[in-house]
Amino acid sequence: MIASGLDRLVAEADALRGRRYALLTHAAALTSALAPAHLALAARVRPALLLAPEHGLHGVEQDMVAVGARPDPWTGLPTASLYGTDAASLRPAPERFAGLDLLVVDLQDIGTRYYTYVAAGVWAAASAARAGCEVWWLDRPNPLGGVVEGNRPRPGFASYVGAFDLPVRHGLTGGEIALREARREGWEGALRIWPVSGWEERSSWPVWGRPWLAPSPNMPDYPTALVYPGLCLLEATGLSEGRGTTRPFRLCGAPGVDAPRLAAALTALRLPGLAFVPALFRPQFQKHAGELCGGVEIVIVAAEKVRPVAAGVRILAALARELGASFSWRQAPYEFVSERPAIDLLTGGDELRRLIETGDDPEAWIASWERDERAYREEWASLRLYGAKR
């Protein structure tokens, strides 16, 4: 049976006695009995402050929506947001931790470099350590298991969606990434990781036997999390990635798209584990809100065969070929960055954008990932807290 770091701390809650601590968490950080972290811990030793990542403590706000500071309605505890109206809000100043001696972090990640929760946790932990606080990271399994896939970002392309030098699908837990960054930045002495027990084989979510609760508003189930490492790239285009529907990251399209033709073109790619069904959909918010969109629904037919990062790159290249002049990149600022296109922030470089703009095949770039993946696995050996690397 898998026991998260939260489960272990709840069982040893006396360790919190006499500590004035802040808790950084969100709605999907649950005990094995499905109690939210802030309720489970407040019932034993109340935190002095709750900190919330993107989407807020209760996972209410959509992506890139500023979250205000307001008391938690369930406990009355003060809450501060780590996702405000500018880039500075993402990194709390050490003064935020004045009067505290401990930061506890419990965030359910989904194992993808773009997903912002680990960045929120690590940046807060580094700041707390500089303020003289101890940091306890309550670790959780990576839902995508230990598989590694994708390129590492190039220097100069770091952002909130590319905060760490990791492949897109990195195979690590939040605690392992925190350990990596603490060693690199020199605050390892302030960090204590409460590891997961029962996860030695780095299994993926379906074998755990736990229900899925959405860690963010557009991550409703495990199949969405599985395709997200590739289909998140659609955020960098003018196409809808299905936000505003019940199938985010599994619907793709725009007004005027010939759905059967697009489905046939994507089917011809023969992407392992995936199928493409013609679809009509009407997003209720974000891109093309209220408009009828033609496109495809992406269906997982063999989860164990899916390589989502490579699939996402091939899908994006095919969309650009099929849609021609109607294909466009996102022009608006992305995660508070305006000087680089969103696609460059997500991919950690400009290679894919340039390949697509010139109509070149991305296969050589995909093949180049093997070098990054091999070097990363060698580095990973010194970071592993669980089982064998893959």
Image (cartoon, grey):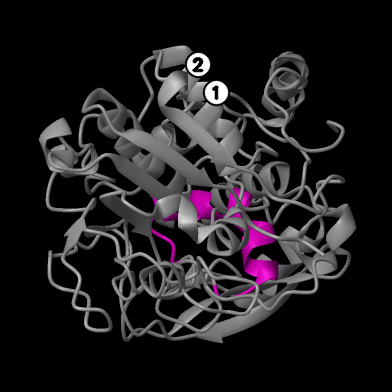
Residue 10's x, y, as percent?
54, 64
Residue 86 - label: none
Q: Would you identify the image quadrant in which residue 73 lies?
A: bottom left
Above or below, 5 against 165 in this view is: below
Q: Which residues are magenta?
A: 220-240
Residue 203's x, y, as percent?
83, 53
Which amino acid type is shown beneath numbered disc 2? Arg
**What is the quadrant of the N terminus in the image?**
bottom right
CA distance separating discs 1 and 2: 5 Å
**What is the quadrant of the C terminus in the image?**
top right
Residue 151's x, y, as percent?
63, 26
Q: What residue is rendered at 31% in x and 28% in y?
A: 129
- Is 274 displayed left or right of 315 in the figure? right
- Is 282 displayed left or right of 174 in the figure? left
Tell me the residue that label 2 is attached to: 183
The kind of secondary structure the magenta stretch mainly shows is helix
Specify whether residue 335 is painted magenta.
no
Q: Would you identify the image quadrant in which residue 275 lies?
A: bottom right
Tell me the residue that label 1 is attached to: 180
